Amino acid sequence: MFLNQLGKIPNILVVGDLMLDRYWFGAVDRISPEAPVPVLSAERTDVRAGGAANVAMNLAQLGANTNLLSVIGDDDAGRTATDLLGAAGVNRHLHLDQAMKTTEKLRIISRQQHLLRVDFEQNPSTEVLERCALDYQQLVSTADVVVLSDYGKGGLGSVQTMIELARNLDLPVVVDPKGSEYANYRGATVVTPNLKEYESVVGTWQSEEEMGEKAAALLVEHGLSHLLVTRGAGGMTLFRLDETPLSLPARTQEVYDVTGAGDTVAAVVAMGLALAAPWSDVLSVANAAAGVVVGKLGTAVATIEEIKTILGRL
């Protein structure tokens, strides 16, 4: 496993939409007399760093020297996320936008079942994004790999310029995408959509062969080197031009929560590219890491030890 062979500690730059995932856990034993809705008797709360911050947390856990460039608001969610990242050893380059609220997702859960999610979000200002772009020009010069974590919250307004700057420095670029406008990601080394996201871009298919044909067309149209489609229970498939697709089945284990699994996959792919590991190894580790985090409730990271356990190589 390439994570055993850290000849150097890679410098990985993560840019994108930071968010805070907040959880309320409790029991539901009755219906409200005021309206036909369940009443949660709250028992405990928890907070996790989500979005681009979760990618950075996973990378730090895997041993990378991780820099996170993002935007937060002047609020409790922003300060909490900053503290969580600091505790995990992530180098924080977080620009404060006084006019916005830090993106926050509140999940209300009873007996491991999601009852409700409440989102608080607001796009950052143009002025703050311009400051981030200047910061990026300095940070990218010392990076080995760039990860762009796009959650559609406005933090990647200049994503195409960021890709061009990185590629001009011969740096691999990993994109965890959002939406169907893949022209924004032109020139990326690898884009990592999940199955639903991939289908929203290329439409449906009737066979694995047709799925591959659609992937090849997407690679050519947008100048992408690789397309890694995570397929849930179907594992993951890597598409490359003029090469046979590389597929791995999912690691069999109970799935509690798929939240953030794509963040973990993007982090492992970035580590693999930084260490010049073979794609077969990268997919094996990414597949195992995804198996770790879906077995946990809520946004989570995969440790090297947990990945080794999944792979059976302790």
Image (spheres, helix red, strand yellow):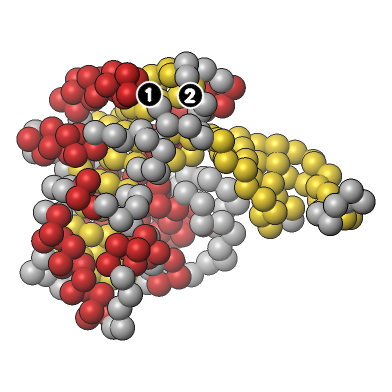
The answer to which of 6 and 280 lies nearer the viewer is 280
Under mark 2, the amino acid is: Met
SS assignment at label 1: loop
Q: Where residue 240 appears, x then y in whole percent?
A: 15, 64
Q: Where residue 92 appears, x then y in whole percent?
A: 38, 22
The answer to which of 221 and 296 lies nearer the viewer is 221
> Which residue does the image show at 32% across and 50% down from the upper left?
177
Up/down of 174 relative to 102, above or below: below
SS assignment at label 2: loop
Q: Which residue is mark 2?
A: 100
Up/down of 171 relative to 308, above or below: above
Describe residue 48's horizontal placement relative to residue 161 as left or right: right
Q: CA distance from mark 2 to mark 1?
A: 8 Å
The first of marks 2 and 1 along the sequence is 2
Residue 284 appears in the picture as rendered: no
Up/down of 263 relative to 146, above or below: below
- Are the residues tagged 2 and 1 within 8 Å (C-beta)? yes
> Which residue does the image show at 34% across and 67% down from the upper left?
199
Describe residue 38's horizontal placement relative to residue 99 as left or right: right
Q: In the rendered image, which quarter contains the N terminus?
A: bottom left
Q: Which label number is shown at residue 125? A: 1
> Which residue does the image show at 40% across and 48% down from the upper left?
264
Q: Would you call the spot at circle 2 few (<14 residues within 10 Å), some (14-19), or many (20 or more)? A: some
Q: In the rendered image, which quarter contains the C terminus?
A: bottom left
Asked where in the image residue 230 lies, by quadrant, the reply is bottom left
Q: Would you call the spot at circle 1 few (<14 residues within 10 Å), some (14-19), or many (20 or more)? A: some
Q: Where residue 109 appears, x then y in whole percent?
A: 70, 50
Q: Which label number is shown at residue 226? A: none
Under mark 1, the amino acid is: Ser
Asked where in the image residue 94 lies, by quadrant, the reply is top left
